[in-house]
Image: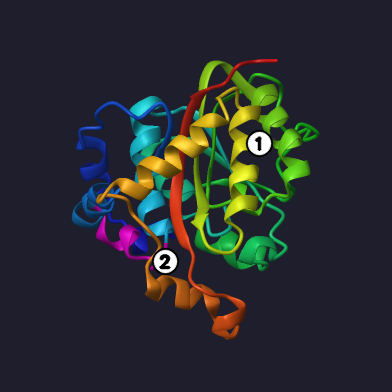
């Protein structure tokens, strides 16, 4: 359970943490944000040794800043539902939607996950508008962490249609997305992110602006060489060379269809 990483005392730190104004629209993770997480929730900010170490704390802060305690939340593609479990312990009603089939390097042993993270509900499926477990307009916030980039571009429509179908009027949706902005796959990642933000009724041109600003900002949190090497695993380096990867961050109102 998340209690092994985040104590009840840590939860109080989260509750008392001044949230500030969440960056509505499209932004990117910064070193300042990572260090903020490292100083205040160290075990979460060092759990994965990759982009998720910055993403998880940002998601927690963003939900606390935009959702009242007790709100209904859905995390899709959660894999190891560490953030979902922390949010449930804080008093949120959290449901995880994930196929638990190993896709996107996620876990497959659902029994182990359920035994480890007992504070959340589980739906073993892929999130889309075809789900029948949620009534329309019943969810306060749908969010994801390091998932959107793994979804085939032609499946994004169903995901966003699901967000719009199941979200309550006036809600926001929140996502942290691994985004390759330099090196192998950069153009495909750009096209993918442009399509996703466009479906969320943001201007796709914001993606190019994001890349320009991230490229020129000394505070940008990039995937490290060490993290890339862990991602590489046993693949020869020539087949998986270094890329410039950021976390694209989205907080946007849900415009109901």
Please provide percent x and percent y for residue 39.
18, 55
Q: Is residue 194 visible?
A: yes
In this view, the mark in front (2 or 1):
1
| Quarter of the rendering occupied by the C terminus | top right
The one of 36 and 229 positioned closer to us in this rendering? 229
Label 2 neighbourhood size at 10 Å, few (<14), some (14-19), many (20+)?
A: few
Identity of the residue drawn at 69% across and 59% down: 100
Q: Which residue is mark 1?
A: 195
Is-magenta flag for residue 49? Answer: yes
Dot 1 lies on which element? helix
Label 1 neighbourhood size at 10 Å, few (<14), some (14-19), many (20+)?
A: many
Per the picture, the main secondary structure of the magenta-coloured stretch is: loop
- Image-quadrant location for residue 160: top right
Magenta extent: 41-50
Please provide percent x and percent y for residue 193.
59, 41
Vertical placement of residue 194 versus 1, above or below: above
Point out the tag, 2 or 1, that comes first from the N-terminus. 2
Is-magenta flag for residue 75? Answer: no
- Image-quadrant location for residue 195: top right
Please provide percent x and percent y for residue 34.
28, 53
Q: CA distance from mark 2 to mark 1?
A: 28 Å
Q: Is residue 29 visible?
A: no
Vertical placement of residue 35 versus 141, above or below: below
| 9 sits to left or right of 128 | left
Q: Which residue is mark 2?
A: 48
Badge number at residue 253:
none
Please provide percent x and percent y for residue 7.
28, 56
């Amino acid at each position: 359970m998340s209690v092994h990483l985040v104590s009840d005392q840590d939860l109080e730190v989260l509750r008392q943490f001044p949230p500030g104004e969440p960056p509505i629209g499209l932004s990117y993770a910064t070193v300042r944000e990572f260090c903020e997480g490292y100083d205040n929730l160290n075990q979460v900010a060092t759990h994965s040794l990759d982009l998720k170490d910055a993403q998880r704390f940002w998601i927690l802060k963003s939900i606390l800043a935009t959702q009242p305690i007790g709100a209904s939340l859905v995390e899709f593609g959660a894999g190891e539902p560490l953030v979902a479990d922390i949010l449930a312990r804080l008093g949120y009603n959290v449901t995880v939607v994930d196929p638990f089939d190993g896709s996107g390097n996620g876990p497959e042993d659902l029994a182990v996950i359920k035994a480890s993270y007992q504070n959340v509900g589980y739906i073993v499926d892929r999130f889309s508008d075809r789900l029948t477990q949620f009534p329309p307009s019943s969810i306060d916030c749908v969010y994801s962490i390091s998932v959107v980039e793994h979804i085939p571009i032609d499946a994004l429509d169903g995901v966003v249609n699901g967000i719009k179908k199941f979200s309550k009027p006036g809600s926001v949706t929140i996502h942290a997305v691994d985004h390759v902005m330099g090196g192998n796959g950069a153009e495909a990642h750009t096209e993918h992110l442009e399509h996703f933000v466009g479906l969320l009724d943001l201007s796709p041109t914001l993606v190019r602006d994001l890349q320009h600003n991230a490229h020129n900002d000394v505070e940008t949190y990039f995937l490290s060489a060490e993290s890339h090497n862990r991602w590489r695993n046993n693949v020869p380096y020539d087949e998986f060379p270094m890329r410039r990867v950021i976390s694209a961050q989205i907080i946007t109102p849900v415009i109901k269809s």
